[in-house]
Image (tube, rainbow, N blue to C red):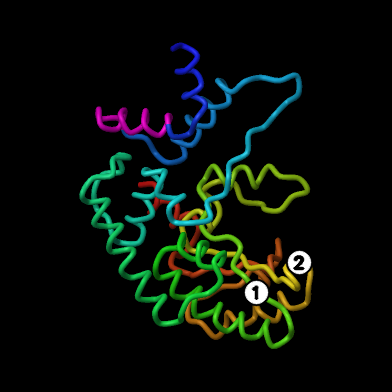
Amino acid sequence: MFKYILNRLTERSTWLGLLALATACGATIEQALADQIIAAGMAALSPKTGKRNRKTTTMADSISDLQKDTFYWQRLLRLAGYYHGAIDGIPGNGTRNGTERWSTDADRYKMETGCFDERTERNISTLLPEAQKAARQWFKLARNEAANQGYEAKIICGTRTYAEQNDLYRQRPKVTNARGGQSWHNFGLAWDFGIFQDRNYLPNHPLYTTLGKLYAKIDGLEWGGTWKSFTDPPHLQLHQFGSISEARRSFET
């Protein structure tokens, strides 16, 4: 029994349940602190080996993955304007109603542009519905332009949790300057795309610039290819807040 309990404490879902219980008892736990508690608890109780072994988080690539973390999902629902209850990790009526409103708007935007490939659809589904609308409008143009040149474009990343962002930040060689809470991906407002030919991913290709520049045709879009300090041609985001700090305050408060 003791071994069974220890094994369960190495799973993220167990810690989410414990945090939900603490919240139900009156505790207030911000998202950043929740992620730190989960990471520290799982690391302390994970089996040790002779080598240093950093556990990585599997990236969410569908809305169902995000909904497993009820704390994070409630914050996304609130950021989208669909939820006004407590951030308590408990999937009650308010959370369910907010999820239904999210799905209704997302389905409406999908009908306007039609369906795309499975990977693109999964990643679009993780974005706030207004960002989904912009992503779909842009991707319809990008997909057609890529096909005209003999390539295939796909959206390969959408929303990332703070824990996922921190894992990405630690990767070497360096792929991002942003820690958890410092990326627009963390708030359902950003996505990355990839270019493929004969199912082979092409990480460096002039077509990234061609497709990225299509952002100018969609109201409110920003493109990472215009950044000065860390140019990121595969990255696009919907501008909804004055700064990343403002977005984070709205998400965490």
Q: Secondary structure at mark 1?
A: strand
User: Picture quarter containing residue 209?
Assistant: bottom right
Which residue occupies the foreground of this view, 178 or 168? Answer: 168
Mark 2 → mark 1, Cα distance in angstroms: 11 Å
* Residue range corresponding to the magenta coloring: 14-27
Q: Residue at x 49, y 70 (%)?
A: 238
Most distant residue in the left direction: 93
Residue at 46% in and 80% down:
114
Please identify the dominant SS of the magenta region: helix
Task: Please name the residue that numbered disc 2 is placed on.
Answer: 200
Q: Is residue 243 above or below residue 207?
A: above
Percent x, y of residue 151: 72, 78
Q: Residue at image x 49%, y 30%?
A: 11
Residue that sits furthest to the bottom in the current view = 148
Q: Is residue 175 left or right of residue 64?
A: right
| Type of amino acid at the residue the image marks with label 1 | Ala
Check if residue 62 falls in the magenta segment: no
